[in-house]
Image (tube, helix red, strand yellow):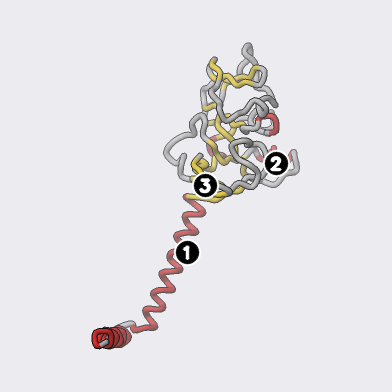
Amino acid sequence: MTVIKTFAKLKRESTKRNDTMAGGGKWRALDFVLYLVLVALILIALRAVVIDPVRVDGRSMLDTFSDEDIMIVDRTAYAFASPKRGDVVICYYPDEYYEDHGLTYASRVKRVVAVAGDVIYTENGRLFVNGEPADEPYVSAERAGGYEIGSAAHPVTVGEGCVFVCGDNRRESSDSRRADVGEIPLCRVAGKVRLVLYPKLRWV
C-alpha cells in the first residue's frame, strides 16, 4: 500500500509541475486540438490527391466488381507512368458523351485493354491485340460480346497518348467500343484501382 500511495503522490506532483510549466494545461489542450486539425488536414489532402474511395455504380464490370462495391483508387499511379493493358482505371469520358446522353459528368471504372500503338479488333466477341487473342480471364463466356471493334481486315490502331477501355461485362458496358466514347486520352485517366474495401477486402 505504501508503494501505491507513494506512486500516486509522485504522479500528483508530476501533474502539478506540468501544469505550472510554460504553457500549462490550457496550452497542452490547445496543442492537442491543433494536432487533431493537422491530422484531419493530412487525411483530407490524401483523400483529394493520393487515395480516393469510389463506389461502383452499375453492372458493367461484372464479375470483377459488383454494383455498390467500394474501391480504393490510387490517384498517383500514373504520375510518372502510363496505364498498362489489364489495369483497372477510373476515367472520364468525352464531354460530348455526357451532353448527348443527358448524363452527369461522372467517372467510370473500366479496364485498359489496349494502349497507344496497339492494333485491335474483335471477332465473335473475342478481343485480338496485335494479331493475338487477348488473355482475359476476367471476361466470362456469358459476359463476352456486345459492341464490336473493327475486324481482322480492318483493325483499329490506338492513338498516341490514349488508351482503349472496356468493361469486363462486355454485353452491358458502354465503353471505348462506342463511337461516342472512343479512345480515352491519358489526361482523362484519373487513377488506378488498387483494392476493394467493401463488401470484402481484396486486392485487384
Q: Earlier in the sequence, mark 1 or mark 2?
A: 1
Other-residue count near label 3 (Cα within 10 Å), few / some / many at <14 / 14–19 / ≥20? few
- Badge 1 marks a residue whose secondary structure is helix
Please state which amino acid type lies under the numbered disc 1. Answer: Ala
Please state which amino acid type lies under the numbered disc 2. Answer: Tyr
Please state which amino acid type lies under the numbered disc 3. Answer: Leu
Nearest-to-viewer mark from 3 and 2:
3
The reply to whether residue 92 is visible in this rendering is yes
Task: Answer with the quarter of the image where residue 12 lies.
Answer: bottom left
- Badge 2 marks a residue whose secondary structure is helix
Task: Identify the residue under disc 1.
Answer: 40
Expressed as whole percent of the image width and height from the top left, the position of residue 194 reads 49, 42
Up the image or down, 28 lies above or below 198; here it is below
Find the residue positioned furthest to the front.
Answer: 1
Compare residues 148 and 9 and report the one nearer the observer: 9
Task: Identify the residue under disc 2.
Answer: 98
Q: Earlier in the sequence, mark 1 or mark 3?
A: 1
Task: Identify the residue under disc 3.
Answer: 201
Q: Earlier in the sequence, mark 3 or mark 2?
A: 2
Expressed as whole percent of the image width and height from the top left, the position of residue 136 reads 56, 26
Distance from Cα at disc 1 to Cα at disc 2: 34 Å
Distance from Cα at disc 1 to Cα at disc 3: 24 Å
Expressed as whole percent of the image width and height from the top left, the position of residue 2 reads 24, 88
